[in-house]
Image: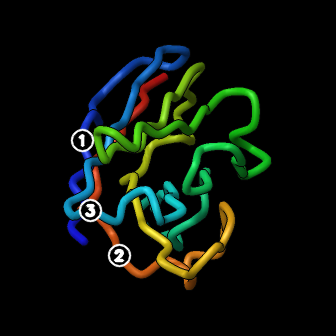
Amino acid sequence: VQLQASGGGSVQAGETLRLSCVASGRMFSSYSMGWFRQAPGKEREFVAAISRTGGATNYADSMKGRFTISRDNAKNTVYLQMNSLKPEDTAVYYCAACTIFNRGPTGRKEEYDYWGQGTQVTVSS
């Protein structure tokens, strides 16, 4: 599985961005998908995840109400809509695929097998 993330950029606080991640292959609809982020000098942290059908989602507490994860299985794509961005949201954002059978939208990065290359999000005050 190859994952290609895009949509990052530089914005002002309060603005929005929508990240996309396109997956290769025919098994995309079998995978739970997640978004993680990593700021300089910090560990990679969980942002949001979505089940293979899109029927269940999971968010880190600090993202609830501001970020929305969604997916389009027909397009092999997962999205992250980010609203009301804050300077502390500045990080490289990674999409990831969890291939564990029937695993829901997990927030545990060790359960993700495939990772995209990351897309930079910079939020200035």
Q: Position of residue 110 (x, y in %)?
A: 56, 85
- Residue at image coords 66%, 61%: 105
Give the labeled residue for mark 2: 114
Most foreground residue, 85 or 70: 70
First of labels 2, 1 by sequence position: 1
For marks 1 and 3 on the same chain, the one whose residue lies earlier in the sequence: 1
Element on which disc 2 rests: strand
Q: Residue, x 65% and y 75% (percent of image)?
A: 108
- Residue at 43% over, 67% down: 97
Q: Amino acid at mark 3?
A: Arg
Query: In x, y percent, where is residue 109?
Result: 56, 76
Q: Determine which of the numbered discs, if any, sits on residue 6 in the image.
A: 1
* Mark sitting earlier along the chain (3/2): 3
Amino acid type, callout 2: Tyr
Query: Does the residue at mark 2 contact the one at mark 1 (Cβ under 8 Å)?
Result: no
Q: Is residue 50 above or below residue 10?
A: below
Q: Could you say which quadrant of the image residue 32 lies in?
A: bottom right
The residue to which callout 3 is attached is 26
